[in-house]
Each structure stands twice: as C-alpha cells, then as structure tokens.
Image: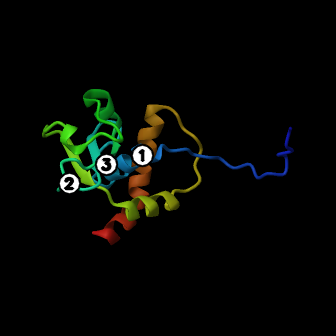
Amino acid sequence: MKYDTSSFPRVPVFCIDSKSFYASVECIRRGLPPLETFLVVIGDASRSGSVVLAASPPMKKNFGIKTGSRYYEVPRDPRIHVVEASMSTYLEFSISLPRLNVCTSTALMRAFFATIQVCMEPIFRRQE
C-alpha cells in the first residue's frame, strides 16, 4: 500500500543517538570535545554495579565501554570522566535544539557541538 506524502511538511531532521547524546551533552557542559573525550554517564556513582547510561565514542572505541556496561567495568584512568546522569538537563537540551540540517562530516559535527555549547550556555548556568 502506498501513501501520498505530498501534503506532509518538508523540514530538515537531525537524528541523534539518545544514548551517546547524554555523553555529548555532559562533554558540552564541561567545555570538552565530545568526539575526543573519555566520558561515561552512570546512574549512581555510589554503587559499583550502577549501569552506564551513555559512553562517549572514544570510551567505546578504546575501552569497550558502552551503554549497559557496569560502573565497575570502567577502568580507573585519570583521562576518564565519570558523570552522574542529569535527565532534566538532557530533556531541556533536546527540546531546545533548533531545527538543523543533517551534517555527517567530523568537521561539521565539531562545529555543531561548538555552536550548541554557546547556544545552551544560559540553560547550563541556570542549573548550577
């Protein structure tokens, strides 16, 4: 069955992996480059069995830590940032994203994250 989609609005859509998104937001909050920083977002730092809710791409690539890993599996390495989740921040950040064109190159993604960091600074200041 075919549907006539000609009457649907045509708008740019930007898709984000919401799990890595948490890690990216935490990097941006700290002024760190999301594509280069070792960072994990966990549920509860006081529990060694706490679940990793998000891991930055370098954590996945270099340490094999991904969503669903446990906190005790995260290596004790001074380069790794361990952050407790802040769901209200992620929600506010995601609904505040402007409509964007899809970008796929690393250079464009870095520019995107730098722009978002500047745009979202007022939100981060309110939560401190």
Q: Nearer the viewer, mark 1 or mark 3?
A: 1
Residue beneath label 3, please? 27
Mark 2 vs 3, N-terminal side: 3
Distance between mark 2 and mark 3 Cα atoms: 18 Å
Front position in the image: 11 or 38: 38
- Asked which quadrant contains residue 86, the reply is bottom left
Distance between mark 1 and mark 3 Cα atoms: 13 Å
**Amino acid at pointer 3:** Cys
25 is higher (above) or lower (below) than 68? below
Front position in the image: 16 or 98: 16
Question: What colour scheme has been applied to the protein in the rendered image?
Answer: rainbow
Is 10 displayed left or right of 123 in the figure?
right
Residue beneath label 2, please? 45
Q: Position of residue 75 (x, y in %)?
A: 17, 36
Distance between mark 2 and mark 1 Cα atoms: 18 Å
Q: Residue furthest top?
A: 62
Q: Residue 83 has which mark?
A: none
**Amino acid at pointer 1:** Lys
- The local secondary structure at tag 3 comes to helix
**Amino acid at pointer 2:** Ala
